Every structure is written in structure tokens, then in C-alpha cells.
Amino acid sequence: MTYPSLTSEPGGIAVAEHIRDGQLSPLEAVDEAIARIEKLDPAINAVVVRDFDRARDTARALDGKDILPHQPLFGVPMTIKESFAIAGLPSCWGFKEYEGQLQDEDATVVRQLKAAGAILLGKTNIPPSLADWQSANPVYGRTGNPHDTTRSPGGSSGGSAAAVASGMVPLEYGTDIGGSVRVPAHFCGVWGHKTSWGLVSKQGHDHPAFKGTDAHDGALSIAGPLTRNADDLALMLELTATLPLRRRDKPIDKCRFLLLLDHPSSEVDASVREPIEAAVEVLRKQG
């Protein structure tokens, strides 16, 4: 299947440009995002921890301030996966016994995004222990796919992908071991990136049953962004990478590509195969 666009809302970079140009204030951007969540989320159940009052306070504090060079997301509203720590908010990983357990400090990724000017509106749904291809748990309930709420948005960053795909927010951050960013991005039709292990800090992303042991990182877990376009994805990675990103410009005719169009256990749908074949043909024509 192909994914219809569910929203005409601008992406994160575009919202930041509107704020920079004076078309929109940070508070207006936040209020509009909150209104979309309140309208759309009763049917989807993606944004399960809400921090609207503090978000509005932060936006008011930014109104009228000069935008600094290190703030490309100045005033841009977003949400983040429930498993990331935000000071003053719960992070229960879907377990009743940890429900209401408030965090003392922000995760590193949260601090980086705030430093870039982003405003966190809340946190999005997950399966228990981040271990399922759906996003449902006894604490927050089940998240529906915004294209069809009777279907799964994927997991474990399903709430993240649903919030972005539906247009509630332009930006999100999830985590991935065996597909937890990539599967929801695919199921919901948005951009998602599994970063290289260790590129983005996982400090402040602790399973409550194993707090302080880095158990999740030991399983090669990574943190990665979800967005509605590639430019936003690249910016999110640049803002959160803790290792230097090396850019290399290499002519196409000097590159080698491996093309895999079949999978031994799952037939590849034409909607996946055909765009890949078209991209390969473009590369072939370029040498």
C-alpha cells in the first residue's frame, strides 16, 4: 500500500522558519500543537503523558527573545518516547508498578533538544519493556495507527510515529534495537532512522527495573529521530549526535551499492520494491 498524507502541517524546520520570520510566536506554535493533540488523540492515544502547562510557560518565556545560532528549533513543539526521562514526568516503561514514578532530571537527548529551542509537550506510548510490534500496555492503553485506528502503529516507538504521522507534532525521538524506530516509521508512513550504536547518548533512558545498569544499552539499543521529511531527520541527528559526524562527498560512479529486493521469509510488496528499483535506475544513469 501507499501512504496518503494525513496532514498538511509543516515540519519542524518550517515551523522554526515561521517563528523566525514573525509569522508565528512560540506560544502560538505550542497552542496549535496542543489543539491538534486534543482533537486527534482521543481516537489514536499516542500522547499519553501530557505536560501542556509547562510547555506553555516555556513558550511564553521564549516569546520576544532573540534566537541564538544554536537554536534552530526555537519554539518548535514536539514530543518524545515515554522511556526517555523528563524531569518531573513519569517514565514507567508500561509497567503498573512503576506508574507515577517521577524522574529527577532530563535525559541527555531531552537536554540537547531543549538547548536547540524545542518545547516538549509530553511523552508518547510504548509497549512494556519496549518489546512488541504494537504499542499497548496496562498503564496507558493501546495506540492506534492514525491511518486506521483498528491497526497497530508498530512498536516500540509506536506512539512516536503516530504523533508525527497524524500531524500532532512535527518531531519525535524514539529508540531501536530490532526495529523499534524503523517498524513504526514504516507502519505509519514517516521518516525514521536507526543511528549507529553510541552516536546518540542514551543517558536518561533506563529501564525502571534495572536503573543505573545500562542494561538496555547493552542490548545494542540506540536513540533515533522520527519526522515527516528527510531534512528534519538530518537536523535532529545533527543536534543530538555526541560523536562528530564526518561528511564525505564521493562521486556516484566511485560508490558501490548492494541491492536486496527479496527476503527469505517475507514477500516484498510492490509498493516497496518499485520505488527501490526506480532509485537504483537513477543511480545507474549517474554512473
Image (tube, rainbow, N blue to C red):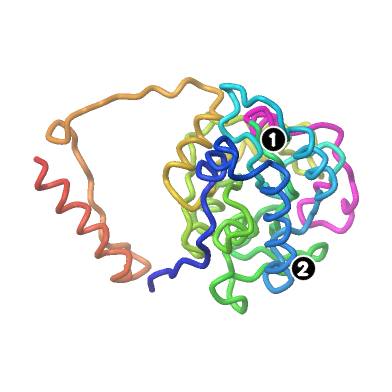
- Toward which corner of the image does residue 230 lie, by quadrant? top left
Relative height, residue 17 to residue 134 (above, below): above
**Residue sitting at 62 percent across and 36 percent down?**
218
Front-most of residues 163 and 40: 40
- Toward which corner of the image does residue 257 lie, by quadrant? top left
Residue stretch rendered in magenta on the structure? 90-116
Q: Position of residue 231 (x, y in %)?
A: 43, 41
Task: Give the label, 2 or 1, closer to the camera.
Answer: 1
- What is the quadrant of the N terminus in the image? bottom left
SS category of the residue bearing label 2:
strand
Q: Amino acid at mark 2?
A: Gly
Residue beneath label 1, please? 110
Magenta stretch: includes residue 98 = yes
**Residue sitting at 48 percent across and 42 percent down?**
233
Residue beneath label 2, please? 141
SS category of the residue bearing label 1:
helix
